[in-house]
Image: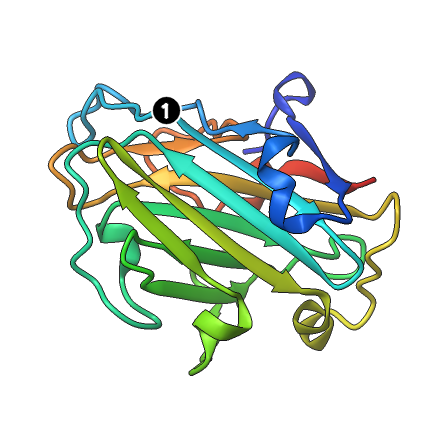
Amino acid sequence: MKKSEQSIRRYHIIRSDAVFQYKSDISIAPVDVFPWSNSDAVDDYCPPTAAGITADDAAFYVFMETAENDIRAAERGFSAKVCTDSCMELFLMPDPVHSPRYFNWEFNPAGAMYLGLGTNRYDREDIILDNYPKLFRLQTCMKTGGWTLEYRIPFGFLGRYFPAFEPRAGHFMRGNFYKCGDKTIHPHYGCWSPIELPKPDFHCSDFFGEIILV
């Protein structure tokens, strides 16, 4: 199933020379669609969540925040099952013109991470990185009533897997931002770009939104 043209969301990545101050004027992508709330397996729980990306000449910078209560952060380290915890995610198809593969970055509030690459849920390669906190400059912060996530995606890292990737103005990508928590007190599944499926499934690139570097 493919999404209707009317439901496609578009996000523009704005370059910034002051990337460490980017949160003050970053373009916001609201993660405000919870397609499966009130289902048998999912609570009617929709924590307010927002995401954004900026860029300089070397990398993308991702910021996400959520007003989530009852935070769960049991997983630790790399390649953990962070989707079972309180989790925020970015699925990104860096070069859809040349490749249907996409990354899925998934993080919990303790800085545990999962990173995969492939074309769908069943075609995934675990990307093993011992130095991931340093490579991505990962920062998480838990606070009363929520938590935040920040990290960097170097263009050189993307180029290893997508040789035709060119981070120039007008470059077109596809992706989605997610908020979930399989084993939290209130199981929930939220997205930025709407997913029109009967059951929770984030690995559906047909429903990815458009992400454009300006």
Mark 1: give few (<14), some (14-19) or many (20+) Cα within 10 Å.
some
Q: Position of residue 201 (x, y in %)?
A: 39, 42
Vertical placement of residue 124 versus 28, above or below: below
Q: Is residue 196 above or below residue 71?
A: above
- Residue 13: image quadrant is top right
Query: On the picture, is 205 further left or further right than 200?
Result: right
Looking at the rendering, which quadrant does residue 176 occupy?
Answer: top right
Question: Which is nearer the eye, 157 or 67?
Answer: 67
In-image side of 111 versus 183 (left or right): right
Q: Residue, x 55% and y 64% (percent of image)?
A: 118
Q: Is residue 111 above or below residue 78?
A: above
Residue annotated with mark 1: 48
Near-viewer residue (204 or 173): 173
Q: Is residue 204 visible?
A: yes
Closer to the camera in the image, 94 or 197? 94
Q: Is residue 179 left or right of residue 3?
A: left
Residue at the extreme right of the image, as rendered: 169
Q: Position of residue 121 (x, y in %)?
A: 44, 57
Display coloring:
rainbow
Q: Quadrant of the C terminus?
A: top right
From the viewer's perspective, tell me whether residue 183 is left or right of residue 139: left
Amino acid found under the numbered disc labelled 1: Pro
Q: Is residue 121 visible?
A: no
Residue found at x 83% / y 48%: 171
